[in-house]
Image: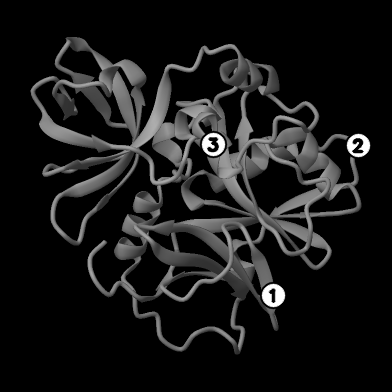
Amino acid sequence: MTAAIHGVAPLAHLGVIAVAGEDAASFLQNQLTTDFQSIPNDEARLAAWCSAKGRMLASFIGFKRGDEILLVVSRDILPQTLKRLSMFVLRMKAKLRDATSEFDLLGNVGDASGKPWALRHVGDASFITLYPADGTSRELLVLPAESPNKPKLTTLDPSVWQWTDVRSGIATITAPIVEAFVPQMLNYESVEGVNFKKGCYPGQEVVARSQFRGTLKRRAFLAHSNGEMNAGQELFHESSRDQPCGTVAQAARSPDGGWDAIVSVQLAAVDGGRVTAGSADGTPVTLAPAPYPLLADV
């Protein structure tokens, strides 16, 4: 990582869905890929919401705050996610709302503590430890709008925060990649985003089959290119110029030059050969392993 990246950035690209009511945890347990029924007060959860075909419709960082569960989600898919997710409440005692205006979301680089997904509350502020970026600690700060505890200075450019997000190797679902991946194609099972012991949820059979029957042929990798990369962009391998071998899940400009990305790529394309972005004649892309061990390697 570029030396001395440190500071706090506003995260206007993220929003919040609040889930309230005595069945809030049960409702999320039936819909998302991780265990919300037994979520402790000192942990957050990475979770995906999938279609019946196991394709990711949204991803969340969820945690308990008071009597509610808050779901931090990409703002560009929040309205459609809220509307569609609310359709499944039926007779359960749970109510969902867009709570984005009620909270400030900040990203802190360099001062985090604890293991990933650790949650602590300090006054009215909630701190969630995220996966590091190139060894540099990161955390998500959620606090009420207009809170007196809000940091007076936001010293980090949001674009740099988004680059650290990429370097952490954990992609967030945004509009260009809705329904593009099953969770394992983005390594979610390896970063506690899938619980294989919990009950059923939409797409659960597909997700389980991908894990245990050896049908998974794509994984998430880090990538670098001198040319611009964007979420949803296709990647091509020299062995098959007409068929894409992968997709960019998330990308950001690197402070060191060029672009870094999280890409989901066919495993057969990782063994060697030229990979390009956008077309078979596009800018070359260099691939690197994800910065955490995969579940099969643990």
Is 193 positioned to the left or the right of 8 in the image? right
Is 89 positioned to the left or the right of 54 in the image? right
Task: Please state which of residues 230 and 196 is positioned toward the viewer in this rendering.
Answer: 196
Can you tell which mark lies on residue 121?
1
Can you tell which mark lies on residue 1?
none
Q: Position of residue 188 (x, y in %)?
A: 54, 37
What residue sits 30% from the left and 64% below the top?
A: 160
Q: Quadrant of the C terminus?
A: top right
Can you tell which mark lies on residue 91?
2
Q: Position of residue 276 (x, y in %)?
A: 16, 27
Q: Position of residue 36 (x, y in %)?
A: 77, 46
Amino acid type at image mark 1: His
What residue sits 76% from the left and 31% below the top?
A: 197
Can you tell which mark lies on residue 298?
3
Q: Position of residue 34 (x, y in %)?
A: 69, 40
Amino acid type at image mark 3: Val
Q: Earlier in the sequence, mark 2 or mark 1?
A: 2
Q: CA distance from mark 3 to mark 2?
A: 41 Å
In the orientation shown, which residue stands out farthest toward the front?
298
